[in-house]
Structure formats: C-alpha cells, structure tokens
Image (spheres, rainbow, N blue to C red):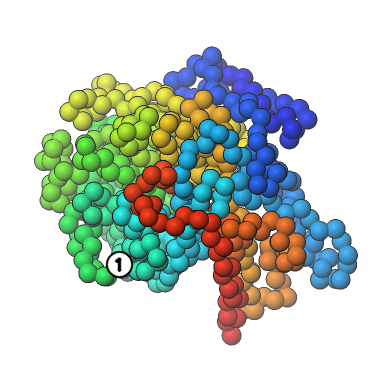
C-alpha cells in the first residue's frame, strides 16, 4: 500500500509545498509516518538556508543549497567560458553557496574531521565551518581518516602504482599515521600486484589496525571454488579479505590475523566443484554466483567496524547491498574454517542483513539496503549504543531512489549470537529510526552517518559535499557545504595526446574576482574542496584536543599545477 508523505520545505526558500508519494518499505505499513523537514532554517555564514534541491543528469546533487540546479549551473559555466573565449561581456553565473548554511542552538558542540577526496589535506572544522587545524600529508586519501585520543591521525592513502586495481572506486594501498603537527610517524604500503587495501580502516583498542583488502585470484581458482565461468569477465576475480596489522617501525607491519572470503563461499551450480550447497540453507556462507555486475570487484566492501565487547567485526558489501558480521576471536587458522572461536562458527558469517535475495531467502521486494556505506555499531555511551547505524545510499529506478540514514536493532541473544526463525531471513523487518528527504538527499556513492552525544545524528552526503546534523525527531540543526572541486582540467585526452583545442571549461575558468565572493576567510580553500568519503565529529572535550590551539587558521591555498602534456 502506497503512503503519502509531505515534505515541508523552508518557507523562505520556496513558494509552495510539494508532496511525494512512494511505497512503504518491506515491514512497514502505509500508516507509518516518517519525520519531515518542517522547521524553518536559520541563515548561516553565507545567508543560505538548508533545503533546496539540485539535480545533475540522473543524480540528485547539491541539496540544502541556495542557488540553481547543478545542471543549470554547469551549463551556465560552459556558456560563460565560451563567452570569455570570444571576448564577449556576458553576465557571470551565480556560484554555489559554501560553508555553514544552518546553525541552531541544538547543534552538538565539537569539531568535525573531513578528508576531501581531491586533496592531500585533512581538516578539522568548528561549528562555524572554519578550519581550526589541518594536516598536510604526502598523498590523497584512500579513503577514511580517524583522529585518535592521543592526537594521532590514522588514515588510508593512495599509492602511485595501482597495478591491476583501479585508481578510483575506493582504492588505497597505504595506511599512515601522522602526529598533530603533520609529521609522518608510520607509512605502510598495503598493496602489491595481487592485493590492495581499500576504502576503510578500523583502529583497534590494542593499537593494531583492521583493513579490508582486495585479493586477486586467477579465474581457474574461482571456477574451482564454484564460480560460473559465464559470470567471469577477464582473467581474475577479486575476493575480499580482512587483515589485522600490527605497526612495526616507521614503515612495516605484521599481519597478526586474517580472514578471507574465499574460505566461506557456497554454490549450487556444479556438484563436482568445491563448496556445493544451497545458499538458502547456508546463511553463514556467501553465494559465489550472486552478482550485481560481471566485474572482478564483485563484492566491493566499503566499510569495516569493530565491537570490542562482542569481539565481532561488521563489514558492508555495496554490490550485495548487505552487511555481514563475523567473529574476530578466532585464530587465523580457525577463521579459515567453520568451527572455533568464541561463537563456535570459525570464520563463517554470524549475521547478515539488507538483501535476502543475495542468498536465496527473498526477492526484490524484500531488499532493504541499496548500495549502503558506513555500517557500524553505535558506540557505548551514546543513545542507541549497540544498534547498527548506516548510510543507505539508494538506487535509481528502485523503491529507494533517495538516500537515508538508518538505524536498526539486531535480534541478538545475551551471548552475542543472533536469532533467526527457520525458513526466514534475519530480522529486523524494519528500521528503528531513519532520516530521509526524497528529492533532496541523495548520494549514490560514499557517505556516512554518525550518532552524536545527546542523540543527534551527523549525516555526510558525500557526493553532494554536504554535512547535516539532525535531531532524533529528524529536524536539521546544522549544515555545512564543502566547496566544490576547483581544479584545472588535464591538458591531455584519454589517448594521451594534447587536447587544448578541445579543452572543456571547468570551475578554474571562473575569474578569481568572482571566486572571492565565495571564499571564506578561515574556511576550507576552494582548491581543497570536493566530495567527502565520510565525516566524524569529535566532542569538544575529546582528549586529542587537550592543550591544543583550536583557534581559526588561515589555510594557504595550494599551488595548482597543470599535468605535463604527453608527447
């Protein structure tokens, strides 16, 4: 049964209200009401309010921003650049609003860590969106960054040699530690011709670091494990693994624990191949022939989190639209098998949720997750502690063609195991809390959500350059727009030949005097802007800030150099 949901936009920004209708999610009735954005916004540093939609092509971007739709803005930029080339005096287009666009009294005090994907710099922002500290690193992120209580910055980084792995889609290949003053303490290359760490890392209480790793195997190995040869593209298939690294020296690490997905697959294609069985009868295993797309990166893990109390790990698979929980208490040998460890199941999945169709226990209508990111347990001491919080990205042409931040309560027993009725997928049937705004909030990739002290939730809609903090009743109380990526376009085309004659205009074609209108003194430089994989807000009394200078800093603008033209 479809339900009617009214989105009340900010009256000072629109002339009318709009109504959106969509079907209820599985497990929800038509009468289940969701919170709406019904509170007038508060003008921030640039005088912009929170809620105005933009769209660019098939993707809705630039929510909560005063201005024109992104597609219109890009068109105007193109027209402006063409006019400038012909020395015509045409009106200059409006530029996007950046910085804090909403700041209410209910906003959580603290400092927000962001690591834009286009820059080597990592920034710490106050609630005015101004930089109180930044780190200069030697490489771009790959992808997440964390600030430890001792003031150490731990981050993934991108290597220069990606071998067979892509330079985009979350690749990393290195893990680093920096002190508060940007001194490099440790830099470990976590990649080779056949392996690469990617997307996310998780610092552990004992000082070790968990990372998710692509492991590339020849197609012969995949077929032997039960992969349908018709579902192979190319000569390799990437299986995911989890490494626990113990840093050593300034550039080394010991692998002290490992889990590999290849040890926990099932297939119902070939009785004579390994791992034969019915996926619906083995929720603890992953169907090696379930696939969203016929590429080597068929799992695409994008998040990892650790629960010290349970000694469990949760990882998220974007292509499966599921998250999986495994036992970390095993030895590496036990993690290869199906017995052992605190929960007696070795390295098998203890729990899975999001898309029962991935293991034959449901169909399209039972799907609850859509390319999700940042699956994690809400930490102890915060409202909802022990629940799972995630960013549900959404997917075009589906029931959820928008993004949401979702919280769910797992069906957990006192001993840390998980309940499941016979012949049914794991519960819950519905989320316990959500924030959504169809038509406005949509990031098809990256992004995250974080529970804050007091119960507010910080949402990072990464491709929209947007951070928004909402109350438990889904009322926005703080929002921030990171600057767009201001870069020179490369002077070479995909073939490596000079392409000056076909050079497309970019934001760097906008005259500097116009850019001055959106440069914020003490804010993130426009040259360091862009998408954000995730954002983390730390409370004002976080131990890392003790004795530190957190006054506003004027960050120097980086020097932008055009790539050399290939001859």
- Where in the figure is residue 492, as x and y percent of width and height? 62, 75
Viewer-proximal residue, 118 or 276?
118
Viewer-proximal residue, 116 or 480?
480
Q: Quadrant of the N terminus?
A: top right
Residue extending furthest toward the bottom:
567
Residue at (73, 75) in percent of width and height = 501
Q: Classify residue 11 by image quadrant.
A: top right
At label 1, counting other C-alpha atoms closer than 10 Å, the crowd grade (few under 14, some 14-19, many 20 or more) is: some
- Where in the figure is residue 61, as x and y percent of width and height? 62, 45
Q: Is residue 65 left or right of residue 310?
A: right
Q: Classify residue 87 by image quadrant.
A: bottom right
Q: Classify residue 356 by image quadrant.
A: top left
Q: Is residue 62 left or right of residue 72?
A: left
Residue at (38, 40) in percent of width and height = 375
Residue 109 in sight here:
yes
Viewer-proximal residue, 130 or 173?
130
Residue at (25, 50) in percent of width and height = 204
- Where in the figure is residue 361, as x and y percent of width and height? 34, 29
Residue extending furthest toward the front:
547
Q: Is residue 32 above or below residue 57?
A: above
Residue to which mark 1 is pinned: 186
């Amino acid at each position: 049964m479809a339900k009617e949901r009214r989105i009340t936009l900010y009256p000072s920004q629109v002339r009318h209200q709009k109504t959106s209708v969509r079907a209820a999610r599985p497990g929800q009735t038509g009468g289940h009401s969701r919170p709406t954005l019904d509170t007038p916004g508060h003008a921030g540093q640039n005088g912009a309010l929170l809620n105005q939609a933009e769209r660019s092509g098939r993707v809705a971007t630039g929510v909560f921003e005063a201005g024109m739709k992104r597609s219109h803005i890009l068109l105007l930029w193109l027209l402006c650049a063409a006019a400038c080339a012909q020395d015509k005096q045409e009106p200059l287009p409006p530029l996007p609003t950046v910085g804090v666009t909403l700041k209410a009294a209910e906003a959580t005090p603290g400092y927000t860590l962001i690591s834009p994907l286009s820059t080597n710099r990592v920034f710490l922002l106050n609630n005015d969106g101004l930089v109180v500290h930044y780190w200069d690193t030697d490489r771009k992120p790959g992808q997440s960054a964390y600030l430890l209580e001792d003031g150490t910055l731990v981050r993934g980084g991108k290597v220069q040699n990606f071998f067979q792995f892509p330079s985009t889609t979350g690749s990393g290949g290195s893990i680093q530690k920096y002190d508060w003053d940007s001194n490099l303490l440790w830099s470990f290359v976590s990649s080779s011709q056949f392996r690469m760490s990617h997307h996310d890392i998780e610092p552990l209480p004992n000082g070790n670091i968990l990372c998710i790793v692509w492991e590339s195997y020849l197609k012969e190995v995949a077929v032997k494990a039960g992969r349908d040869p018709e579902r192979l593209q190319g000569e390799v298939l990437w299986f995911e693994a989890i490494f626990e690294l113990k840093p050593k020296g300034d550039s080394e690490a010991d692998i002290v624990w490992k889990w590999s997905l290849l040890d926990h697959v099932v297939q119902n294609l070939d009785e004579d191949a390994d791992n034969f069985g019915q996926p619906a009868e083995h929720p603890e295993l992953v169907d090696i022939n379930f696939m969203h797309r016929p590429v080597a990166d068929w799992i695409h893990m994008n998040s990892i989190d650790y629960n010290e109390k349970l000694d469990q790990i949760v990882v998220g698979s974007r292509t499966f639209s599921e998250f999986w929980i495994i036992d970390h208490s095993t030895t590496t040998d036990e993690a290869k098998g199906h017995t052992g460890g605190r929960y007696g199941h070795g390295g098998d999945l203890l729990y899975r949720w999001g898309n029962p169709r991935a293991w034959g226990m449901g169909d399209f209508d039972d799907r609850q997750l859509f390319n999700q990111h940042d699956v994690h347990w809400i930490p102890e001491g915060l409202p909802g502690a022990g629940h799972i919080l995630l960013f549900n990205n959404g997917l075009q042409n589906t029931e959820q063609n928008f993004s949401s931040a979702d919280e769910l309560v797992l069906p957990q027993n006192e001993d840390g195991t998980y309940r499941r009725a016979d012949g049914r997928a794991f519960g819950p049937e519905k989320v316990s809390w959500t924030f959504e705004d169809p038509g406005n909030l949509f990031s098809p990739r990256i992004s995250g959500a974080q529970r804050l002290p007091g119960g507010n939730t910080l949402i990072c809609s990464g491709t929209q350059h947007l951070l928004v903090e909402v109350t438990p009743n889904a009322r926005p109380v703080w929002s921030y727009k990171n600057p767009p990526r201001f870069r020179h376009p490369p002077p070479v085309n995909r073939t490596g030949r000079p392409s000056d004659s076909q050079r497309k205009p970019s934001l760097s074609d906008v005259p500097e005097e116009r850019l001055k209108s959106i440069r914020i003194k003490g804010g993130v430089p426009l040259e360091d802007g862009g998408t954000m994989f995730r954002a983390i807000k730390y409370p004002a009394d976080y131990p890392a800030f003790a004795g530190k200078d957190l006054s506003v800093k004027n960050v120097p603008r980086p020097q932008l150099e055009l790539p050399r033209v290939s001859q």
